Image: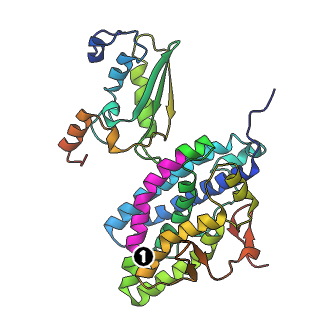
Amino acid sequence: MSADYPSLCTHDAQDPCCPALWDALREVTDPEIPISLVDMGLIVAVALRDGVAQVTMTLTAMGCPATEFITDDIRARLLQEPGVRAVEIEIVWDPVWTKARLSEDGVDIMRTWGISA
Amino acid sequence: MVSTAIDNAALFAVLSSLADNKQLLGRRYAHWSNGAPSLEAAVAAAAMTQDELGHARTLYPLLEQFEQGQADLTQLDPMTRDARYALAALDHEFLGWADFIAANFLLDTALTTFFAAAQDSSYEPLRARARKVVQEERLHLTHGEGWVARLANAGGAVRANLVEALGRWWDETLCWFGPDDDPTMRRLYDDGMIDATPDTLRSRYLAVVMPVLSRVGLDEPVSHDEASGEWRPTESLPWARWDATTRRLGVIS
């Protein structure tokens, strides 16, 4: 794994919570608002098993027209990570997304863009 | 090889009906994204279109898991499916904006009543989707309530159009839940997939729509028992024309 991710300051690269993958996903932004999928609270879980990154995520709306853009961007970004040879993405509706899933940074970013959060 | 497909005709039929109604509702809403009476209404129509098609999109794949679905794979894709489990009222484009509002306020609310009853479903895929659908439908109901009041209070031909439109959707929407002994809904209730019987679902639905209609003086043939809190249609529903498999009204033969 790359060694320059913020989460690796507090987590070993082999940490099962996959800090590097979470950090990589912080570089993937929502297609409609310049906020990362992580700060938006769309990423539910991340795991790495036998080189397969398994991402469990939700969306703000079931009819999200940007679903494929988002999943394509996740795949493209995670495949750049050392040790990742494939990406599996599961979209779930439980937990239900609400603005309570925004990170603290996410709330600030949304407010910066004039969106109530 | 042992089949892992689910053999449950009742659940398959209801999921099919939910998916078809959502899919067609979305398509009918879409037409008005470019023809609503105001820019704000057009934006709302577009947003609700997106939601309805999204709901359908998450329901159709569930059909693949059923033996009943695997029997005819062409019926699993909305593009090739020719089985029609949606209300007959959705067979044609809306006659006008009042029809949009009637479908939004009545049919969409009825389907949401079902999803609300499935939020603790023993069938996990339905449970997970139901909570999200209920969340998204709150705004649809607000939209429907607001426009029912607006059209009704306008009076004259506008109010008359609304009354006619509500009439076109009233019976078939009430029928969608099925008669109280409907074996399909009863099976779902008995299996813990929903938490109410058809009559209770109908009562819950009426408890949402009737106060709104009453506030604007639109009284429907419905009784309310203050003691039990239950709402009941006071006129018989057209069960002779209702198809229990497709959950829609047919023509009088």
Q: Please state the horizontal and vertical placement of residue B158, each as a whole percent of the image.
A: 42, 84
Is residue A20 one of those drawn in magenta? no
Q: State left or right for residue B119 relative to residue A37.
A: right
Q: Quadrant of the N terminus of chain B?
A: top right
Q: Is residue A70 or residue B129 the one in the foreground?
A: B129
Task: Tell me the residue that label 1 is attached to.
Answer: B148
- Which subunit holds the residue at mark 1? B
Q: How many marks?
A: 1
Q: Please state the horizontal and vertical placement of residue B108, each as a whole percent of the image.
A: 52, 63
> Vertical placement of B71 versus B238: above or below?
above
Q: Residue furthest bottom?
A: B156
> Vertical placement of B143 versus A23: above or below?
below
Amino acid type shown at disc 1: Val
Q: Residue furthest left?
A: A112
Q: Quadrant of residue A40?
A: top left
Element carrying mark 1: helix
Q: Main secondary structure of the magenta part?
A: helix
> Vertical placement of B180 versus B129: above or below?
below
> Vertical placement of B214 versus A44: above or below?
below
Q: State left or right for residue B53 relative to residue A25.
A: right
- In percent of the image, x 47 and y 87: which residue is there? B160
- In percent of the image, x 69 and y 64: which residue is there? B247
Q: Please state the horizontal and vertical placement of residue B179, each as a whole percent of the image.
A: 71, 68
Q: Quadrant of residue B199?
A: bottom right
Q: Residues within 10 Å of mark 1 (few under 14, many from 20)?
A: many
Q: State left or right for residue B36 relative to residue A35.
A: right
Is residue B138 one of those drawn in magenta? yes
| Magenta span of residues | B129-147
Q: Residue furthest right?
A: B1
